[in-house]
Amino acid sequence: EGLGIPASVVENLVLKHLAAYPKCDLVELTQRLCVVSNIVELALAQLRKRSWVEVYQPASDKLSHSYSNVRYSLTEFGLAEADIAYRKDPYIGPVPVSLEDYWTVVEGQDLRKNPIMRADVERALSDVFGSEHLIPVLGPAINSGRAMLLYGHAGTGKSYVAARVL
């Protein structure tokens, strides 16, 4: 599906979400799963083929036939499968990322591969009064990759500097 995870993971999450939040529409499921709607639609189509999900379309005026009016719910078989899925893995939340994608992001944040240069710190603190005293200290502290403590009196701009450096 392009997510780098098995389709069954997405399908099980859809089952568990529909068990926890009955009669969801596509928009709500998409928001809860944090993926694009076509991925949720593919999972719903597979679950409908197995007769685990049923579709409810509210009786409304004939002018409003949108996907947001269509609601999905679990059949008895779907509830049983959702229970099995929940017993195997109680996680219910957004679709997880693949381990490969996770490592790509983590490695991209590695300071050893992407050190902060003096110009970066100068640019970040360009509008901070007295930053010329902080720049020689902050650059090496950031590049150490360790925890950093900014201390001083209240109201001296510690939080502002920290937010700018991030």
Image: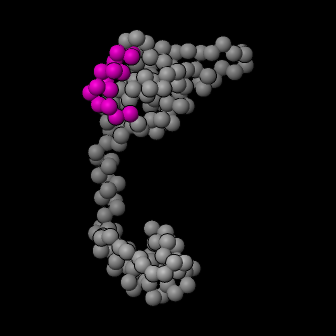
The quadrant the N terminus occupies is: top left
Residue 15: x and y in percent read 40, 23
Q: Is residue 81 above or below residue 16?
A: above
> Taking 88 as reference, is 130 above or below it?
below
Quarter in which the C terminus is drawn: bottom left
Q: How is the image coloured?
A: one colour
Q: Is residue 143 left or right of residue 166?
A: left
Percent x, y for residue 44?
44, 22
| Numbered marks: total | 0
Residue 72 place in picture, x, y as percent: 51, 20
- The main secondary structure of the magenta stretch is helix
Identity of the residue drawn at 48% across and 14% down: 54
Residue placed most toward the observer, 12 or 3: 12
Along the viewing direction, whichever of 100 and 133 lies nearer the viewer = 133
Point 34% across, 18% down: residue = 81
Q: Nearer the viewer, residue 3 or 86?
A: 86
Left or right: residue 64 versus residue 67 is right
Residue with the most extreme front position: 154
Residue 124 visible in this rendered orientation of the protein:
no
Q: Which residues are magenta?
A: 78-92
**Residue 133 screen position, x and y as percent:** 45, 88
**Does residue 158 appear anywhere in the picture?**
yes
Q: Is residue 68 magenta?
A: no
Residue at horizontal 36%, vertical 40%?
Answer: 96
Q: Furthest residue to the left?
A: 88
Q: Looking at the rendering, which quadrant does residue 4 occupy?
A: top left
Please name the residue shown 48% across and 76% down the image.
158
